Every structure is written in C-alpha cells, then in structure tokens.
Amino acid sequence: MKTSNNPQNLLARKWMQLALLKLLKSRDLSEITISQLTQTAGVARVTFYRNYTDLSDVLFDYLEMSEFGLVEIGEKKFYLPSLIRSYFTFFQTHRELINCIQKHNMMTRFSDALEKQISSNLYLMVSAYGFENSYEISALVGLFMKILTDWLQKGMQESIEEMTIIVYRIITKFNCIAP
C-alpha cells in the first residue's frame, strides 16, 4: 500500500473505502473488481493504483484510518475499560468486515494492524496498567485476537459490556500476579 496524506488523496481513499464497504454488503470480496470499486467510488482506476495494490489494502487502510474505533472516544481512550469497550463496539459494528477478513485468511494481517495500532498509540496508557515492553504488548494483542476470534465464532452472543468486563478482569489479573 502506497498512500499519501494530501487532502485530495485522503478524500479519494475515503471514497474507495466507503465504496468497498457498500459493495461488500451485496457480494463477496473475491467477486468485486477494481473497476466496480472505482466506479462506485467515483474515482479513476489510476487513483486506486496510486494508493493500493489490491482490494485488501483498501480494507486495512480503512481499519488504520479509523484507528479501530478509537477516533470516536477521544480522551477516554486512556482509560482501559473505555479502550476495551471501544474495540468491542468497533468489532461488533464491523462484524461483516471482520468476518470477511477472517473468511479470506487475513487474520494475521488484521492482528499485525491491531498490534501496530496498540503499540504506536497506546503504549504509554497500557504501561500504566503494568505492560512495559513490546512482548507484553504482543501478549495483549494475542489476548484480544483470541477472544475476538472466539466471540465471532460463537456469534457474538455476549454483550459488549460483558466482553469489556471479561478482558478487563484478565488484564488486571496479570497485573496483580507480576513479581
């Protein structure tokens, strides 16, 4: 993915992201062509290739630009329960997108994007709860990924609040048993 942050380019990328999300409501990712995407977005094919190499790049650009839902919670993202709740809210809201990523065997890339987001934006906040290095951040991401995968496979039966409490309790238990 080769992206630029100039305002016109950001707008074109956003249009392509929204177009892909719209197309995914009616067809599978493997059935969508770049021509269909660019036509729906109202941009030229060259705009697509200036920013992306394939359709999965558009999905992950969307996830990264939305910061997995953290944009919406502002300063509350530095309070661990709010942070956890925002992730599960985002995952539930974008259930079809996450299922698409899982169906097309892109969970490793999803995990990498989540780890990048947590480690780059939340390292200081997370360290306040006892996580001090990159291995502990990796463990936190692994925890989120496993719980998210299980929650998806079980049909997201538990509420966002229940999932928030479960993850928060696990994280604080690790903090309590540290030497």
Image (cartoon, rainbow, N blue to C red):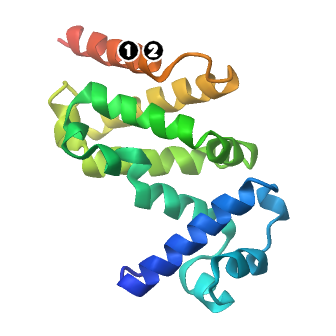
Seen as rendered, the residue at the extreme right is: 31
Number of on-image labels:
2
**In front here: 156 or 53?**
156
What label does residue 162 carry, if any? Answer: 2
Q: Secondary structure at mark 1?
A: helix
- From the image, tell me which residue sits under label 1: 165
Q: Please name the amino acid that badge 1 sits on.
A: Ile
Q: Residues within 10 Å of mark 1 (few under 14, many from 20)?
A: some
Q: Residues within 10 Å of mark 2 (few under 14, many from 20)?
A: few
Q: Residue at x 62, y 17 (%)?
A: 157
- Residue 159 in percent (x, y) is at 51, 19
Relative to 134, say whether 165 is above or below.
above
Q: Please name the amino acid that badge 2 sits on.
A: Glu
- Please give left or right for residue 11 compared with residue 15 in the image: left
Residue 49: quadrant of the picture: bottom right
Q: Is residue 2 visible?
A: no
Q: Residue at x 46, y 34 (%)?
A: 89
